[in-house]
Image (cartoon, rainbow, N blue to C red):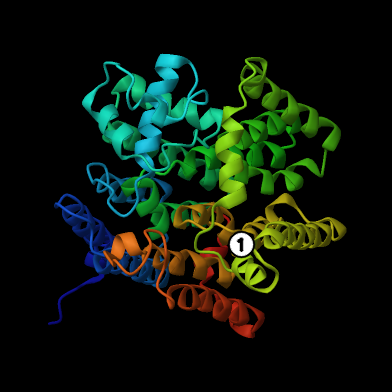
Amino acid sequence: MKPDTTAARKTFPRWLLPFLLALGGYLFLAFFSLQRGRLPLGIWWSVQATGWIACAWFLRTARASWPSMSAILVMALLFRICGLWATPTLEDDYHRYLWDGWRTLHDGSPYDHAPQDFFARPETRPPGIETALNELNHPDLTTIYTPVTQLLFAAAAAIAPGSLVTLKALLLLIDAALILLLSICAGRAAAWFYGWCPLVVVENAFHAHPEGWALLWLIAAWICARRRRYFVAGLLAGVAVAAKLFALLAVPFLVWRRPLVVVPALLAALTFIYGPILAAGSSAEWAGLQAMAGTFKFNSLGYALLALCFGPEAARLLWAILFGLLAALFFAQWARHKRSLAQAPVAEVFLVFFLLAPVLNPWYAVWLVPFAVAARTPAAVALLVAVPLSYATGLNLGDPTLANYAQPALVRPVEFGIVMLAALAGLAPIRRRLPGALSLAG
């Protein structure tokens, strides 16, 4: 007699195997992240590839048995727990987060002085804060991080100054809340994609980037707008913008239905948050932002091509104009057809912004994830897959022939070539055959 496997199938969901594959990859990354020295890029990319293979396998197996929301949340949290004690070695922004939190607690503001002002200043500082001061990048510039994000850094510093684990634990809780909000706003598919997306897992949980903090407020505003609570939506949108300026790209869609309610609420929130800074007469916050906007460039496509044709100064203006025109086109098409907020082309606007901007750090692409499910845009998913290639820099490769943040010649052609091929595929009938799980409403 053949063994009866029916009961086994009921007690062993098929999606458990891809979960275990992804979990194994993140445990592998956590182990190597604890070793001395810089993490080999081959390991970083291999874990990313494993995570995406697990996502594709999950979608294939989950069609017949989609997991519960509680299961999705538990799996996402287990992925992130793997990164709690991992020390980032491929980039070092977390030192600035720890330093800013400490300065906010002690000075009331991290904007008044650049970190280098404290190099020779006698002050009793915890060891973790001293390390952050000595190792953060661009110590001559004031912080670029906005006030609501500074509150997050200050909360971590209040619990345990200089503790990266504490900051990561807060980010884990934020991701958990965001996953639950996404399940309300866009259904289990969106919650699953954010919970499982390899780029989100490694950038939020392993590198401690606070993208989820700003997204949390933006998605909360989105839910309120869809429920016609426009005043609250405006307030929350203002908080999101004050957490990270990227939220501004989504604001026009929130404003459109009730501008006379949303705009005053948004401005009221921004006035309340920025008022004390402006009243104190501090302009130091803008110095860091101006330096980044005016001089920084990394991993760019549109700006790099424009700079090649017209020079870097003209390119700084031209890319912004081009983006404004394309974003207005997306918005006008959406508004003209009177589509719902759920159909707003936010993913497309973010995608165009990232492809044109002078700076595209890998963690910026996390902003695509909550909106990519609704858009079902292959190019957006392709960018999430390809953008980790940008970690190939002179510093991370240990290549003395390259500057610290310079990339080998082939990196951007391969990275953006993948995105362009996916964009072409999106124009073909293959777009209609995307996995059915991504179109679930709940």
> Considering the image in quadrants, where does the N terminus appear?
bottom left
- Asked if 198 appears above or below 274 in the picture, the reply is below
Q: Is residue 303 shown to the viewer in this render?
A: yes
Using the image as rendered, state which of residue 260 and residue 20 is in the foreground: 260
Most distant residue in the front direction = 120
- Asked if 158 appears above or below 353 in the picture, the reply is above
State which quadrant residue 333 falls in.
bottom right
Residue 401 horizontal/vertical position (percent) = 33, 69
Q: Quick check: 195 left or right of 353?
A: left
Q: Is residue 197 shown to the viewer in this render?
A: no
Residue 156 horizontal/vertical position (percent) = 36, 26
Residue at 75 percent across and 33 percent down: it is 230
Using the image as rendered, state which of residue 440 and residue 380 is in the foreground: 380
Q: Quick check: 202 left or right of 8?
A: right
Residue at 55 percent across and 81 percent down: it is 421
Mark 1 surroundings within 10 Å by alpha-carbon count, few (fewer than 14), some (14 through 19), many (20 or more): many
State which quadrant residue 308 falls in.
bottom right
Residue 425 horizontal/vertical position (percent) = 59, 82
Disc 1: which residue: 351
Name the residue type under label 1: Leu
Residue at 30 percent across and 51 percent down: it is 79
Which structural element holds mark 1?
A: helix
- Asked if 265 appears above or below 386 in the picture, the reply is above
Disc count in the image?
A: 1
Residue at 22 percent across and 66 percent down: it is 8
Q: Quick check: 33 left or right of 175?
A: left
